[in-house]
Amino acid sequence: MSKRDFRLVTDVSREELQELFQLTAGMKDRPEDYSRALAGKTMAMINEKQSLRTKVTFEAGIQQLGGFSVYLTNHDINLGKREPVKDVARNLARWVDLIVARVYKQDTIHELADYASVPVINALSDEGHPCQIVSDMFTLWDQVRGRDRLHGFKITYIGDGNNVCNSLILAAGLLGLDLVICTPAGYEPHSRAVDTGRRMAEEIGGSVRFEPEPLKAVKDAQALYTDVWTSMGQEAEQQKRLEAFQGFQINESLLEAADDKAVIMHCLPAHRGEEITDAALESKQSIIFDQAENRLHGQKAIMKFLVDRSK
Ligand code: CP
Ligand code: NVA
């Protein structure tokens, strides 16, 4: 059996990302048309970390497509410690049709994908959160661009150059976004994501630029995106990070420097009062809960897309 994985945003091509947007739109507009799309299929979800949105949208999503889910925490399988990751992959692949995994290390995603004969989906790792970013780009395509292309769309990412930021950079490459990254020194995104995303964006007239001064970085942005300063697993660094990120908050003064039509984005969960103020998160410019809704439609589309291509 040949199969497709979704380990990184760039596991899909430019054309396939547009196809995913169309499929997500179909799932959103006419969910009843897809109620048997994955009938009888089972998805196993491995979670080494906590989750609200990703857990619920994948589990509810496969059920809405006529399938089933098995949820596995560290308490159940203790991934990589009770037995090697490659053995977990080869066991699960004999029983289920899809593996979704939220893990500490990107290498774990690759090992699962290398050894499982069924599609493996990255549901967040240290290096990326591809499902998040695909549904976020769908949100912009759907409600800000009126289902038109995102080529040249200007996004400023402000805060930590983390997993979400890395995936956004790769999406900039596929879509030809004009992406500005604004992080404190020492908290830049992964160089592999920057090199790939920038090269691909430039191929089609987009860009990935760095601007370390927040008030300059937000100028002309059509969307402002932020994420937590301290990601899951980095709790011991919280104090140091709180100090390093001062000035990188989405707040009233930053919004004054930005276009008042710019939408505000966040993958959630938010640490209100750190990377974003309560007022910014709750403002009319915020599309944060639309992003959260679209995780459901997006997860359903990604699961169907991969299963259909893995026959
Ligand atoms: N945005 C996101 O992935 O949320 P969870 O961590 O709650 O799944
Ligand atoms: N960067 C955050 C994203 C959570 C969805 C984390 O890794 O904790």
Image (cartoon, rainbow, N blue to C red):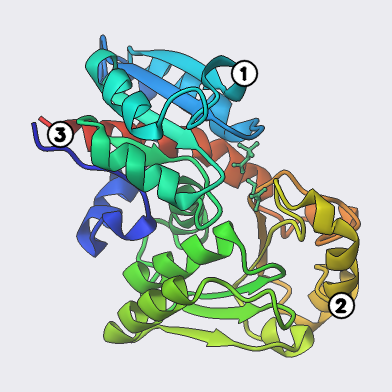
Q: Look at mark 3 in the image and give the residue it sits on.
A: 310
Q: Is residue 25 left or right of residue 46?
A: left
Q: Quadrant of the N terminus?
A: top left
The amino acid type of the residue labelled 3 equals Ser
Q: Position of residue 133 (x, y in %)?
A: 49, 54
**Mark before the other along the chain sequence, 3 or 2:** 2
For the residues labelled 3 and 2, the Cα–Cα distance comes to 47 Å
**Ligand 1 within 8 angstroms of badge 1 C-beta:** no
Looking at the image, which residue is at 89% across and 70% down? 252
The amino acid type of the residue labelled 1 equals His
Q: Mark 3 touching mark 2, by CB under 8 A?
A: no
Q: Would you call the spot at circle 3 few (<14 residues within 10 Å), some (14-19), or many (20 or more)?
A: some
For the residues labelled 1 and 3, the Cα–Cα distance comes to 30 Å
Pick the front one: 59 or 142: 59
Pick the front one: 107 or 151: 107
Q: Position of residue 241 (x, y in %)?
A: 83, 66
Q: Look at mark 2 in the image and give the residue it sits on.
A: 247
Residue 18, quarter of the rendered image: bottom left
**Mark before the other along the chain sequence, 1 or 2:** 1
Front of the two marks 1 and 2: 1
Looking at the image, which residue is at 57% across and 65% down? 165
Q: Quadrant of the C terminus?
A: top left
The tag on residue 301 is: none
Q: Position of residue 141 (x, y in %)?
A: 43, 58
For the residues labelled 1 and 2, the Cα–Cα distance comes to 39 Å
**Ligand 2 within 8 angstroms of badge 2 C-beta:** no
Residue 264, quarter of the rendered image: bottom right
Looking at the image, which residue is at 56% across and 58% down? 163
Q: Look at mark 1 in the image and give the residue it sits on.
A: 75
